[in-house]
Image: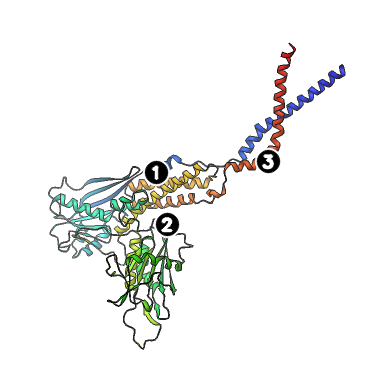
Amino acid sequence: MAAAAAAAAADEAEKARGRRAALSFAAIAVVLGLPLWWRTTETYRAALPYADIAALGELPFQLAVPVAVVFSPGSLPEDLPRPLPFRETQEKETLLNPRTSITSRYEIVYRSTTAQEEAALDAVTAQEADAALHPLQDTSLGSLTIYVIPETSSLLPQGVGVYVGKHRGALVRAGEGLAALRTRLQQVTQVMSFTASSITAALSDRVPTSQLGPDARRHFKSSLGYEITFSLLNPDPKSHAVHWDIEGAVNHYVQPFLDKLSFVANFSVDSQILYYAVLGVTPRFDKESSSFLLSAHSLPHVINPVEARLGSSAASLYPVLNFLLYVPERSHSPLYIQDKDGALVGTNAFHSPRWGGIMVYNVEGPVPPQASFPLHVEVDMVRVMEVFLAQLRLLFGISREVVPPEFLLESPGNEGLADWELDRLLWARTVENIATVSTTLTSLAQLLDKIGNIVIKDDVASEVYRAVAAVQNAMAELATGRLHTAFQASKEAVTSSERAFFDPSLLHLLYFPDDQKFAIYIPLFLPMAVPILLSLAKIFREAKQRKKEPTKMD
């Protein structure tokens, strides 16, 4: 009996040790193993400003334009509300959609001319006055200075009521009373700053197509850089030896224009000559004019075959603007382009929205019978670059508003761009950049919310925070009329948002669903977990049985 009791006691002690061991393993696995595994396999996700990003979905733009209205002697209206100087603010709100609105605020300062300005206004012509007044004006981006001159002044030509110069100044006749003057001032400010249509075109991705004008999607989207390629297409080098001084033409005509736009983006210019490159459309021969014609409906089919030969956009990081000079082969000369009404296009050129332009350059004059081939063709680069520069302006969205007949707009000269035209572009590009950053960050936030196991590194989070702060700064600068700093902030926001969105660590292919994780972890943890779980089940059954045994003895 004593031996049996000792054996039973020893067996019970062994079972107790087994239970304690199983409980210890289970406790270690639960208390230490699971937290350690969770911590070491946890997806690191830095905090992001989701609330600020959501707030960017609503964009109440406030665009403030500082305007100085300067009255010269004899131009002061009799019904002016109060003596000079004084300030006035004019506001107008345009609701594009429930989440986007534009408030135009013109902060106008009325004052009299200074002695220097009066001397400048004594010039013989408006051009001379504009040049003399330029050093005396506020030259900050987005600002306007409008000089009011007497209605009978000879400074402006007969029949001209408003002269808009090359800089940020304009000359306006006083008109008959304050109401007429304010109408002219409103027209001038819209021509020289922005209009609802120009800002709506910049927000084309947020606005229904019905609200957009016909040219809203013609210009290139805002970008940090552009590549401009000039190509000479010579499909018949056996007949024509074409020479063009593209380097000199670019330096003389295009480079001053790009230098003026260097604040907007970075530009690179290159050129090439393509031989045996023909159009993808066979022109129609017209017997009456003994020439070949390209109709308007065939022009879209010209680009694709030619674009395959260009090869410039395949490896480009930025949008590419293509300008093609096509010298038709001898069998299709002369070649002319028709518009939709069947009339010949004066420039013999056309442009494609967000792509570039093509100009057909015919070899002038009949070929003498004794001429030797190939004929030497010297391209008139003045005529060609005038066309390409006009197309370049259109593709950047630099187009002048339709103005009343009494308006006279000064030519921008060799630079190809007036100061106030640059301001118009910057207003639109700043708004477009802000909207682009809002869309980019919203898409990024939705992606990270949808895929919870994507790692959000600290550098990605810092770029997002930097982009949000830059957008908020740009909005604030626009509201105070500081266009220069607003555009700079919007560019910084675009850079930071694109760095965050295109960070390699955020690639969707680097991550996999949770069910694939279980497929990896189950073969690893199941062999270790089964003995522990079976031991815990056995301990539970034995404990339940011990509770029942005293009841049976009673």
Residue where numbered disc 3 is placed: 524
Examine the rendered structure and indicate whether residue 265 appears above or below residue 91.
Answer: below
Q: Label 3 is placed on what type of residue? A: Leu
In the picture provided, is 363 more to the left or to the right than 459? left
**Nearer to the camera, 41 or 361:** 361
How would you rate the neighbour count of disc 2 (Cα within 10 Å): few for under 14, some for 14-19, many for 20 or more?
some
C-alpha separation, residue under disc 2 versus residue under disc 3: 50 Å
Q: CA distance from mark 1 to mark 3?
A: 46 Å
Q: Is residue 514 above or below residue 157?
A: above
Residue 102 image point, x, y percent: 31, 46
Q: Residues within 10 Å of mark 3 (few under 14, many from 20)?
A: few
**Circle 1: element type:** loop
Q: Is residue 474 left or right of residue 32?
A: left
Q: Position of residue 222 (x, y in %)?
A: 39, 55
- Say which label, 2 or 3, has the lower sequence index: 2
User: Is residue 269 among the parts visible in the rendering?
Assistant: no
Residue beneath label 2, please? Answer: 224
Occupied quadrant, residue 537: top right
Q: Residue at x 38, y 81 (%)?
A: 376
